[in-house]
Amino acid sequence: MMFLIAVVAGLTSIYCLTIASFVWEDVGFGCVVSIVLVAIFRKTLLPRNLPGPGRVVHMIVYMPVLIWMLLVDILKGTWQVAIYVVGVKRLDHPGIVKIPLGQHGRTGVGMVSLFLTISPGSFLVDIDWDERWMLVHFIDASNPARLRREVERYYRLWEYDTDLPPGTDGPEDPGRRSSVDA
């Protein structure tokens, strides 16, 4: 129930931000439209088993932290790409890093891969569900262990009650393929 309230509140907020008005009439109309949309598309929008109240509170509380982390990563990635494009720094270590998925679920992996692709300087290349790893290309793959730790921090924030997989940092350089080596 709490999850449904959060979805309706989120849709209502998006509606009010879209029309740039938070007067009570617009909030009320947006809430009614949101409730109708959730009722019509409930099976499509919502998972079969709705998350418990603890997970919903976790998502609401940590959403500003997630948005902040994404904003910082986007700004850092934009700066890093701009330095390479302008020619201030030479592109020495581009490469693909193999990141273990551990016990993370499909939703968590999907969201984290989206977060990685939003930030300039990295993008998802492939996910192997059988072997439980994903390949991510980074513009600077000189330190794969650090990159794996950075990816893992999104999992820690996103996945509420999941045990962290053992050995997330892994060996210093497994699975890294540089375009220089290819």
Image (spheres, grey):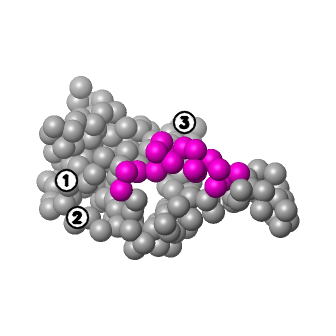
Residue type at the position of mark 2 = Leu
Is mark 3 in CB contact (under 8 Å) with mark 1? no
- Residue 164 marker: 2
Magenta run includes residue 120 = no
Viewer can see residue 140: no
The residue tagged 1 is 102
Callout 2: SS? loop
Q: Marks 2 and 3, Cα distance to the nearest angstrom?
A: 37 Å
The residue tagged 3 is 85
Q: Which of 113 and 61 is in front in this view?
A: 61
Q: Where is residue 1 in the image (x, y as percent from the top left)?
A: 49, 66
For marks 1 and 2, the one nearer the N-term is 1
Q: Position of residue 161 (x, y in %)?
A: 29, 68
Q: Where is residue 149 in the image (x, y as percent from the top left)?
A: 30, 59
Residue at point 19% right, 43% down?
Answer: 132
How many discs mark residues in the rendered view? Answer: 3
Q: Which of 102 and 176 is in front in this view?
A: 102
Is mark 1 in CB contact (under 8 Å) with mark 2? yes
178 lies above or below 8: above
Residue type at the position of mark 3 = Val
Callout 3: SS? helix
Viewer can see residue 48: yes
Q: Quick check: 4 left or right of 142?
A: right
139 lies above or below 157: above
Q: In this picture, which residue range is highlighted in magenta?
A: 33-49
Which quarter of the rendering shows the C terminus? top left
Q: Marks 3 and 1, Cα distance to the nearest angstrom?
A: 35 Å
Query: Local crowd at mark 3 within 10 Å, few (<14), some, or many (≥20)?
Result: few
Residue type at the position of mark 1 = Gly
Q: Which of 86 and 96 is in front in this view?
A: 96
Q: Nearer the viewer, mark 3 or mark 1?
A: 1
